[in-house]
Amino acid sequence: TEETLVLIKPDGVARGLTGAILARIEAKGYSLVDIRLVEPDRDVLERHYAEHEGKPFYEPLLDFMMSGPSVAIRVAGNRVIEGFRSLAGITDPTTAAPGTIRGDLGRDWGLRVQQNLVHGSDSVESAARELDIWF
Ligand code: GTP
Ligand code: MG
């Protein structure tokens, strides 16, 4: 079995979608191993989003991620890294497929950063690195 880091980002928490998103993760058969409400400081976010430093959306992304609490979840299951990315849908909520978290629940606010409700680790290496940052 495998573990991944899922974040319910500030837009998801603020819109009251925490329960709906957790229900989708559980309904898929994945296990919630640990969960916490966090208000990350800039240092945590710089480490988490190191791969995006210098990109045009980087500073707006960090500001967005500091705009309110997120829920960090350690999720376990067979192929959960790939599986949660599939549940989440692609990055852009406008074109994410219906049936996915972002496709069904994500809204395009027309801002400089995609407020796309969730984050999921994208590889075994990312998952280990990110779980260490948030837990
Ligand atoms: P995460 O699961 O959050 O990592 O999403 P992702 O893997 O689908 O996207 P990626 O890691 O490439 O980018 C991280 C976050 O930066 C995204 O979830 C968006 O919030 C934001 N982002 C990524 N690419 C763009 C972009 O081209 N434009 C804007 N405005 N925001 C972006
Ligand atoms: Mg990513």
Image (cartoon, rainbow, N blue to C red):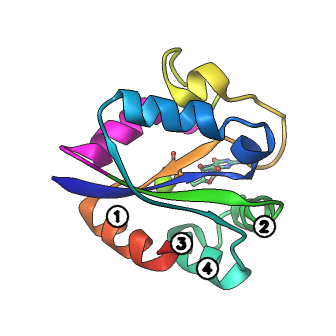
Q: Which mark is residue 127?
A: 1
Real-space CA distance between mark 1 and mark 3, rounded to the nearest whole angstrom: 11 Å
Helix, strand or loop for disc 1? helix
Q: Which mark is residue 48?
A: 3
Q: Which residue is mark 2?
A: 66
Q: Which residue is mark 4?
A: 44
Real-space CA distance between mark 1 and mark 2, rounded to the nearest whole angstrom: 21 Å
Tag 2 or tag 4, which sits nearer the N-term? 4
Kindly identify the amino acid type of the residue bearing the numbered disc 2.
Answer: Met
Kindly identify the amino acid type of the residue bearing the numbered disc 1.
Answer: Ala
Q: Mark 3–mark 2 contact, CB under 8 Å?
A: no
Q: Is residue 23 left or right of residue 115?
A: left
Q: Nearer the viewer, residue 50 or 13?
A: 13
On the question of residue 95 being in view, the answer is no
Tag 4 or tag 1, which sits nearer the N-term? 4
Q: Quadrant of residue 84?
A: top left
- At label 4, counting other C-alpha atoms closer than 10 Å, the crowd grade (few under 14, some 14-19, many 20 or more) is some
Q: Is residue 87 left or right of residue 44?
A: left
Q: Is residue 88 magenta?
A: yes
Q: Mark 4–mark 3 contact, CB under 8 Å?
A: yes
Q: Residue at x 76, y 30 (%)?
A: 108
- At label 2, counting other C-alpha atoms closer than 10 Å, the crowd grade (few under 14, some 14-19, many 20 or more) is some
Q: Mark 1–mark 3 contact, CB under 8 Å?
A: no
Q: Measured from the top left, where is residue 57 in percent x and y? A: 72, 58
Q: Which residues are magenta?
A: 76-91
Q: Residue at x 53, y 14 (%)?
A: 98
